Image (cartoon, rainbow, N blue to C red):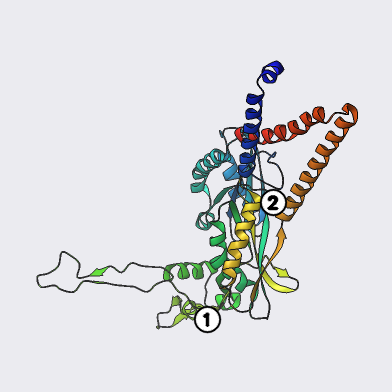
Amino acid sequence: MSRFFIDRPIFAWMLAMGLMLAGVLAILTLPIAQYPTIAPPAVSISATYPGASAETLENSVTQVIEQQLKGIDHLLYFSSTGASNGLVTITVTFEPGTNPDIAQVQVQNKLTQATPLLPAEVQAQGLIVEKAQSDFIMIVALYDTDGRHDTIDLGDYLTSKVADPISRLDGVGDTQVLGADYAMRIWLDPYKLNNYKLMPSDVAAAVLAQNVQVPAGELGALPAAPGQELDATINGQSRLKTADQFKAVILKTGSDGSIVRLGDVARVEIGGDNYTQLARLNGHPASALAIKLASGANALKTVALVKSRIAQLATQFPPGIAVSLPVDNSSFIRLSITDVVETLLIAIALVVAVMFLFLQNWRATLIPAIAGPVVLLGTFAVLSIAG
């Protein structure tokens, strides 16, 4: 084989240059990540049962779902965690090399069989199936600078104005808001409920029944009477929006015409949808958006896109809201790449020096000096072809 290339030097040069060119092009397309993908793929299932204890979650949610997770291709094992806040997470782990997209579809299909068996409260909250990601590539935080906003204000603004534009960027696999959104909080007074002979379930049923969007229909639609010229859409009362509207919800009526409203037995206010998280940045109220990298995405390119998009959105932030990047793992990746390149250059220089020291001939030394870059760049081309 060596004689073939020695007798055809032009072909050997063209082949070497072709390998180098292919390697340079491959470098531009190969993914860059903080750690290599060596862990087996996993799919996570998240469900919420408000007010349930960990034991209740185990009996009514976790076991029901786990019993349906059978017959899935390449399944290794699954594990589950349930907390006292009503949140349960089941992680389904597959054999290395399994296509995570196919695994997610199979888990989703199995979950549809378990959904009708779950409590109605869990079904109403919804179940989330997603590919389990590794650590966050970066965290974007919004914090208050002048005392105008609290954590809930920042969390709601982050969810409504920042999370969606960021999640649509190329390379972003998943986002998680570390904070709370706005929600209508109803704090029941048990003594007043007892005085009016009401139960919390009565309050929940009344709110659900009176806080609905009802299509009222159309007036004057075809078929219409002769001479009918008016055709109007009727807009009924929409969902309740303010605390005063919720306070006016009727809970009970008496035979004497008396009415018990929600405001008579409860304190109603706009607050956070949960109070399990409290975020602060350097002592200031804050809320954060954690960003996970998509499978096979370029970490450096994704972080650059996120920073550029955040800079655009920051020009529209209300007064008193500032942005910070408390976690940015791309800096670690850049330093790692710099160290690898420096080490590689030092190694090539040492190889050339040792070869010249023993051969005492620059022409003979030039051969391994040229072969090094050809082999290294060819390796990148092979990595790209092999996926």
* Nearer-the-camera pick, 200 or 84: 84
Number of other residues with Cα within 10 Å of mark 2, as a class: few under 14, some 14 to 19, many 20 or more:
few
Q: Residue at x 74, y 31 (%)?
A: 371
Residue linked to disc 1: 264
Extreme-right residue of the structure? 357
Where is residue 4? Give x, y as percent: 67, 17
Position of the C terminus by quadrant: top right
| Real-space CA distance between mark 2 and mark 1, rounded to the nearest whole angstrom | 48 Å
Residue 8 picture quarter: top right
Residue 52 showing in the rendered view: no
Position of the N terminus by quadrant: top right
Label 1 sits on a secondary structure element that is helix
Where is residue 368? Give x, y as percent: 78, 30
Residue 229 showing in the rendered view: yes
Q: Nearer the viewer, mark 2 or mark 1?
A: 2
* Nearer-the-camera pick, 117 or 216: 216
Q: Are marks 2 and 1 in contact (CB under 8 Å)?
A: no
Label 2 sits on a secondary structure element that is loop
Q: Locate residue 230 relative to residue 318 in the image: left or right.
A: left
- Residue 386, numbered label: none
Residue linked to disc 2: 135
* Nearer-the-camera pick, 83 or 265: 83
The kind of residue tagged 1 is: Asp
Q: Residue at x 46, y 67 (%)?
A: 208
The kind of residue tagged 2 is: Asp
Where is residue 119? Give x, y as percent: 53, 53
Extreme-left residue of the structure? 226
